[in-house]
């Protein structure tokens, strides 16, 4: 899309969207949201970027190699945290008994491993959305 | 050494290989033969007198230890089954190198099996030869060898050896020889397993293996005819197997036990359901036995197999079907000996009904067999129909054994004796046919003649075998036929007088057999020479093998008491028969009474009369109308239903439409080579084509309507669940 | 440590699956090596788990040590341990086969993607077997559906896309039905844990009969679509025949069985046998199973393509399993589970040998298979052994499962079903025997073939021979499997 107005507005809007997405991801254990919805918003931000500027630019900014690593990294994060639970507390995905800092309910740094997992999920969902969108665009290019 | 036959002026010599008279195979087989004769003679001496192993003094101590080891070996039945199996694998490996070494291996394997079977005699006699293999096939395999099993195992093994020696020369004219011998050995192993089985489950296992390995023998030559005959054989065989399986499952659920122990009391509790259960099992076994009306595979399968295979199929394998019927009938249907006192006891009613059915089925089989045999011109086909007819004799004997209950010992002995005898002379007849075929490449008896000059020894063998099957006194057939005759007389003496008619038919059919073999011998060996294509080979090893069997025939014919006392009477005693009856009538039965001899002469006269009449009035070429085919009649209702389905599905009125609509589909039943003529579309063809049309019509419709189907089903399921709770 | 084995196996599968895209260099070869090694190690560990469960009894594994009513729970008993071992081992055999076969089926860059998908597929299968939580099962089920569609469409041909799309749509319908059923049951019982839900439903089902009925109906239909019960089997022929051979083998032998396990769990753990019998469900299942057995075979007779014929044969065999299930007796359940194992082995053997024929000779049409037994003896012998099992010849595991099923049918007092079983055995003979016979006994259409020892690559031969030997082994000593399966049936019936 080559519209000047859209480009200008999206340049302003996209950072806010990303911040909002990160907020939802980080506060997943306190407020509604969490990894999936936050990641979707992050992904939507990048999709908006792709639509406004061309697909080529977006794919250079977010290449397949990076998204691959992010996705695998997300899953690996989840797995490693779960394995920590096995080592320390004899059960997969243990939270309090796994030695994570629980803290007070309602504060940002609390609830043990859940924020970490949420971050992992958020990253993964975002990169999945972007990959999917780029793949569909690539298919269209080939048609 | 392969030499070429010289082209002689005036006579066309068949282009085949001529072998020197004494090569390594013949030397080995002659050696094996001589050793076997000695061992058999020794065995006969051992069983007759208690001479023990002390004849040869010193040398025998070490021999005695070996013999004792094998005789007392607990796993002997397993070993006997394993030896031909392993031998078969070795033979296949050998066959890549040389034909001779392979065939020598075959002969030695058969020889070793025979020795091991002989070693079973002492323990089979005292009834302690049982073996249980735990956990195999879920329920365990059990082996139990009593005298009946041992008799059949010995008949099989003794017959297998000459046939294997014979087949060396014969099979050199066929392809895929190693495969043939492998499946022969597998069949041998399976047959021995079947007769040694101690319960119905084990017998079923080996029975199925036997069906499949003998299928490979039937369709060995891979021609269209043999493949077609093979399909018929296989599918009817599988049907029989499924029937036995169904009966076996039902029996096991109702009585909890499948071993061969007398079960008449439990069967009586089942009410009329027992007819279904036992009937299914007997149906399955009688398919293999070639009993009418399910004998239809036999005349198709036996002619197309290679001659050694035909000899053993006809000689041994169909007997296993009869063995199955006999075993099931005389154990499941009979009460245990402590449960009854007298032959009028109520528990015998179970066996009575089956017995009379078997007797009449036997009579029908005999009649159909002989009548169809008289119409044939192909020698092997005629012999196949005679197998059907002689199986009718055996089934008749079994029928009497079951019908008369406590007093059925005569029928039992007659059936057993005829099993042994028929094995001997039928295989001999097939071997003769094989020699004739090798010599003249012709199997049509009307096109042959005057062969007694060119094949004098074979003609003599054929004469001996023909005397055997027709019942000439002095040859073995006479003995078993007279015992069966006594049995039938007892049937109407102690049972219903309707069996008088059975006896009359029995005599007429014996006369028909005489006539038929008169026809065979006369047309093939006597008369003028008709063909001029003769092979230049000599058949010395084959003739030696045939001579061995012929000697056995004459020996049994002249010394019938040996088999009776050593094998048959101990077997009869193991069954629930009246011991007093056995001692009075069966032991010391006089065979060569004047009344029996006069009757035989009468039958021969009648046979000659039929032959003369047949030649005069040309009765031997009757062509039946199409609807008199047994297969057609049996499958008539199912065919009609399938035709109706075809009509509803694809709007096809005639069979030509059916074939046209399903053309180009897969499955050999649709192959043009397999559909004779649209009007005689066989059952399997029709079944497959109907399935085709059904698929063609509905498959795509189903696939396209997927969501619709889901919706309909969910709606119906929910409505049904909610409304009807 | 041993009690962590289920989750560790799953974690290993998942982590290796996402590791594969990150590899550099010869991705195809490395991914094959990783897959085979991982599956081998997993099956060894699962064998240790089976031994432990047999000695020490069943246990439950709570994630994060949470209570069962709020956490995810894995139930490790002899059934789940053995079945996951079976799944992983059979998958190992198929993956060994695929190391050489997959090069010919899909493009080079897709090979590593294929192994990723297979590992995720196995991850979800193991999860579905072990899990004791309904929603967790739903999640794994969704992963399973998606990856099984993916391994069909990884071969980029038009009919693959169509088949995968149809499979996807029908799977989604099935999943949604299941989800609706789960939601209804949760609404009524307040638990998602299967054992707790079972307890609460047994107390309250008099109060909410309609709700439970509808939920059951939806769930059963949903699972029936996925398990290819006639007449909801429609996606199966296209999907299984067009997929690459290892995918067909995986789908036909393993994936549809997982849904069978899910049905077992739902009917017995969640609802309980009494409620199920009271609802009249066994009769309905029996009708569908019997018709599947007959119609599957009838449709199979009319097929030209060998893989399509094998797919329809699967439909018929799944009918057997559901028939065993519908009897609701210990013998029936055990026979059904035994047939799961034996059919898995036989169908794998059949698909792998069909795949070898396609690999070597590029022939899929049954009419062109004359004389192929001479060129490929090992392949056709394995095919013959498995086909004999399908027909029901003694000595093969198919015969034993038919025998056990027949005894179970009679024990439950349904003699008519026995006739159906035997009739369908005979129909199996109608379409399997001609293939074997024409392969060995007819002349090949082209004349320049000489008999040679097999020229397939050794991994394919190894896989074929292994699965053939396993068929014969379970045929001759079915006790090995039958003991475990009978214990599993007892566990189900007593829950």
Image (cartoon, coloured by chain):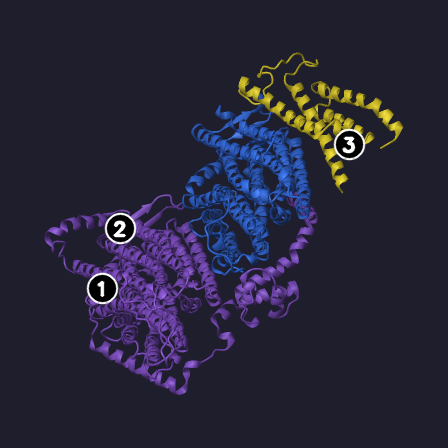
Chain colours: A yellow, B purple, C blue
Work out whether B252 lies above or below C276: below
Circle count: 3
List the single residue furthest toward the right. Answer: A5
Task: Assign the C terminus of chain B to one quadrant of the image.
Answer: top right
The answer to whether the residues at label 2 and label 1 have Cβ atoms under 8 Å apart is no
Report, in whole angstroms, how far the alpha carbon at label 3 lies from the one at label 2: 86 Å
The answer to whether the residues at label 3 and label 2 have Cβ atoms under 8 Å apart is no
Report, in whole angstroms, how far the alpha carbon at label 1 lies from the one at label 3: 99 Å
Q: Residues within 10 Å of mark 3 (few under 14, many from 20)?
A: few
Q: Are labels 1 and 3 on one chain?
A: no
Q: Chain of mark 1?
A: B
Work out whether C483 lies above or below B432: above
Residue B93 location in percent, x, y?
37, 52
Dot 3 falls on a residue whose secondary structure is helix
Residue picked out by circle 1: B563
Dot 2 falls on a residue whose secondary structure is loop
Residue B668 location in percent, x, y?
54, 62
* Res. A56 mark: 3
Work out whether A9 lies above or below B547: above
Question: Which is nearer the eye, B271 or B219?
Answer: B219
């Amino acid at each position: 899309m080559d519209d000047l107005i859209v480009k200008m507005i999206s340049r302003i809007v996209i950072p806010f969207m990303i911040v909002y997405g990160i907020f939802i991801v980080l506060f997943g254990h306190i407020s509604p949201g969490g990894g999936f919805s936050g990641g979707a918003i992050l992904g939507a931000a990048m999709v908006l970027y792709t639509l406004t500027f061309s697909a080529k630019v977006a794919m250079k900014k977010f290449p397949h190699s990076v998204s691959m690593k992010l996705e695998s990294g997300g899953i690996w994060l989840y797995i490693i945290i779960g394995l920590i639970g096995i080592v320390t507390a004899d059960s997969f995905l243990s939270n309090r008994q796994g030695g994570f800092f629980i803290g007070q309910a309602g504060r940002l740094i609390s609830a043990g491993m859940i924020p970490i997992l949420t971050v992992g999920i958020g990253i993964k969902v975002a990169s999945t959305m972007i990959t999917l969108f780029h793949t569909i665009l690539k298919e269209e290019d080939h048609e | 050494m392969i030499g070429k036959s010289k082209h002689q002026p005036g006579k066309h010599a068949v282009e085949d290989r001529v072998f020197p008279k004494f090569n390594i195979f013949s030397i080995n087989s002659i050696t094996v033969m001589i050793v076997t004769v000695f061992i058999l003679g020794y065995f006969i001496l051992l069983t007759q007198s208690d001479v023990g192993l002390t004849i040869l003094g010193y040398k025998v101590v070490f021999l005695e230890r070996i013999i004792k080891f094998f005789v007392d070996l607990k796993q002997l039945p397993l070993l006997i089954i394993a030896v031909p199996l392993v031998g078969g694998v070795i033979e296949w490996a050998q066959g890549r190198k040389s034909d001779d070494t392979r065939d020598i291996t075959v002969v030695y394997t058969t020889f070793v099996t025979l020795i091991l079977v002989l070693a079973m005699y002492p323990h089979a006699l005292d009834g302690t030869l049982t073996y249980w293999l735990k956990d195999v096939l879920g329920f365990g395999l059990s082996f139990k060898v009593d005298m009946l099993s041992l008799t059949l195992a010995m008949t099989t093994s003794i017959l297998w050896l000459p046939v294997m020696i014979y087949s060396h020369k014969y099979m050199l004219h066929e392809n895929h020889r190693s495969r043939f011998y492998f499946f022969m050995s597998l069949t041998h192993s399976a047959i021995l397993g079947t007769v040694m089985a101690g319960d119905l489950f084990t017998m079923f296992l080996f029975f199925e293996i036997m069906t499949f390995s003998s299928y490979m023998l039937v369709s060995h030559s891979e021609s269209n005819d043999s493949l077609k005959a093979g399909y018929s054989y296989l599918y009817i065989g599988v049907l029989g197997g499924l029937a036995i399986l169904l009966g076996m499952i039902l029996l096991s659920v109702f009585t909890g036990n499948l071993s061969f122990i007398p079960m008449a009391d439990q069967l009586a509790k089942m009410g009329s359901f027992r007819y279904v259960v036992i009937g299914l099992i007997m149906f399955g076994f009688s398919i293999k036995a070639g009993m009418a009306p399910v004998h239809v595979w036999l005349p198709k399968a036996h002619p197309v197999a290679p001659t050694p295979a035909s000899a053993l199929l006809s000689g041994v394998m169909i007997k296993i079907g009869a063995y199955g019927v006999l075993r099931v009938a005389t154990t499941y249907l009979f009460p245990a000996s402590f449960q009854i006192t007298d032959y009028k006891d109520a528990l015998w009613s179970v066996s009575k009904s089956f017995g009379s059915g078997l007797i009449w089925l036997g009579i029908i089989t005999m009649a159909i067999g002989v009548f169809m045999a008289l119409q044939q011109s192909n020698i092997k086909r005629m012999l196949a129909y005679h197998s059907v007819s002689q199986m009718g004799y055996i089934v008749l004997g079994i029928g009497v054994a079951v019908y008369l209950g406590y007093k059925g010992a005569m029928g039992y002995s007659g059936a057993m004796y005829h099993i042994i005898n028929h094995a001997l002379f039928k295989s001999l007849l097939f071997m003769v046919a094989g020699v004739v075929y090798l010599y003249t490449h012709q199997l049509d008896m009307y096109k042959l003649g005057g062969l007694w000059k060119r094949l004098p020894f074979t003609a003599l063998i054929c004469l001996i075998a023909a005397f055997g099957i027709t019942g000439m006194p002095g040859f073995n057939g006479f003995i078993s036929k007279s015992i069966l005759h006594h049995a039938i007389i007892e049937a109407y003496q102690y049972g219903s007088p309707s069996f008088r008619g059975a006896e009359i038919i029995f005599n007429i059919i014996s006369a028909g057999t005489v006539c038929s073999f008169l026809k065979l011998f006369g047309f093939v060996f006597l008369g003028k020479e008709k063909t001029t294509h003769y092979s230049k080979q000599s058949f010395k090893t084959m003739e030696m093998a045939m001579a061995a069997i012929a000697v056995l025939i004459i020996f049994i014919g002249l010394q019938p008491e040996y088999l009776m006392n050593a094998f048959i009477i101990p077997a009869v005693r193991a069954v629930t028969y009246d011991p007093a009856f056995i001692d009075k009538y069966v032991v010391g039965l006089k065979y060569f009474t004047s009344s029996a001899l006069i009757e035989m002469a009468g039958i021969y006269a009648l046979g000659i009369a039929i032959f003369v009449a047949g030649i005069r009035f040309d009765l031997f070429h009757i062509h039946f109308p199409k609807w008199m085919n047994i297969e057609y009649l049996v499958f008539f209702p199912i065919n009609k239903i399938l035709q109706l389905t075809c009509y509803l599905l694809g709007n096809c009125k005639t069979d030509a439409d059916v074939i046209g609509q399903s053309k180009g589909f897969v499955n050999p039943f649709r192959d043009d080579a397999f559909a004779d003529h649209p009007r005689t579309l066989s059952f399997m063809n029709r079944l497959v084509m109907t399935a085709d049309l059904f698929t063609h019509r509905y498959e795509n419709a189903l696939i396209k309507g997927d969501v619709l189907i889901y919706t309909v089903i969910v709606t119906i399921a929910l409505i049904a669940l909610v409304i009807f709770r | 440590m041993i009690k962590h084995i289920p989750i560790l196996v799953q974690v290993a599968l998942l982590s290796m699956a996402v590791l594969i895209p990150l590899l550099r260099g010869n991705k195809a070869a490395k991914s094959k090596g990783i897959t085979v090694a991982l599956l081998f190690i997993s099956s060894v560990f699962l064998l240790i788990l089976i031994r432990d469960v047999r000695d020490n009894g069943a246990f439950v594994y709570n994630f994060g040590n949470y209570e069962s009513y709020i956490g995810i729970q894995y139930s490790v008993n002899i059934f789940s341990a053995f079945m996951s071992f079976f799944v992983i081992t059979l998958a190992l055999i198929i993956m060994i086969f695929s190391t050489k076969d997959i090069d010919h089926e899909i493009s080079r860059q897709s090979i590593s993607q294929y192994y990723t998908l297979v590992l995720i597929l196995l991850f979800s299968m193991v999860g579905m077997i072990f899990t004791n939580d309904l929603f967790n099962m739903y999640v794994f089920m969704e992963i399973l559906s998606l990856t099984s569609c993916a391994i069909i469409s990884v071969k980029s041909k038009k009919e693959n896309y169509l088949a995968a799309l149809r499979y996807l749509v029908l799977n989604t319908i099935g999943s949604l039905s299941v989800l609706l059923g789960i939601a209804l049951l949760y609404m009524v019982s307040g638990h998602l844990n299967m054992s707790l839900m079972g307890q609460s439903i047994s107390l309250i089902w008099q109060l909410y009969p309609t709700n439970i009925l509808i939920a059951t109906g939806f769930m059963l239909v949903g699972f029936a679509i996925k398990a290819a019960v006639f007449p909801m089997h429609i996606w199966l022929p296209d999907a299984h025949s067009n997929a690459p051979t290892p995918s067909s083998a995986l789908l036909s032998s393993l994936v549809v069985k997982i849904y069978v396990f899910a049905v077992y769990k739902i009917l017995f753990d969640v609802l309980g046998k009494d409620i199920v019998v009271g609802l009249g469900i066994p009769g309905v299942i029996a009708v569908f199973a019997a018709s599947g057995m007959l119609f599957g075979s009838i449709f199979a007779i009319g097929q030209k393509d060998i893989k399509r014929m094998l797919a329809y044969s699967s439909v018929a065999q799944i009918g057997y399993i559901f028939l065993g299930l519908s009897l609701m007796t210990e013998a029936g359940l055990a026979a059904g589970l035994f047939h799961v194992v034996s059919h898995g082995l036989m169908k794998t053997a059949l698909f792998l040998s069909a795949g070898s024929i396609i690999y070597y000779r590029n022939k899929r049409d049954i009419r062109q298979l004359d004389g192929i037994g001479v060129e490929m003896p090992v392949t056709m012998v394995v095919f013959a052994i498995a086909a004999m099992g399908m027909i029901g010849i003694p000595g093969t595991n198919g015969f034993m499962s038919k025998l056990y099923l027949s005894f179970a049918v009679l024990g439950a007092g349904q003699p008519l079903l026995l006739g159906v079983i035997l009739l369908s055995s005979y129909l199996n003979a109608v379409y399997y025997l001609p293939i074997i016979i024409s392969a060995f006994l007819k002349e090949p259409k082209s004349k320049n073939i000489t008999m040679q020892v097999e020229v397939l690559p050794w991994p394919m031969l190894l896989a074929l021979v292994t699965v053939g030997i396993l068929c014969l082994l379970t045929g001759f000593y079915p006790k090995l499997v039958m003991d475990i399966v009978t214990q599993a049936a007892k566990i189900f019936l007593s829950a």
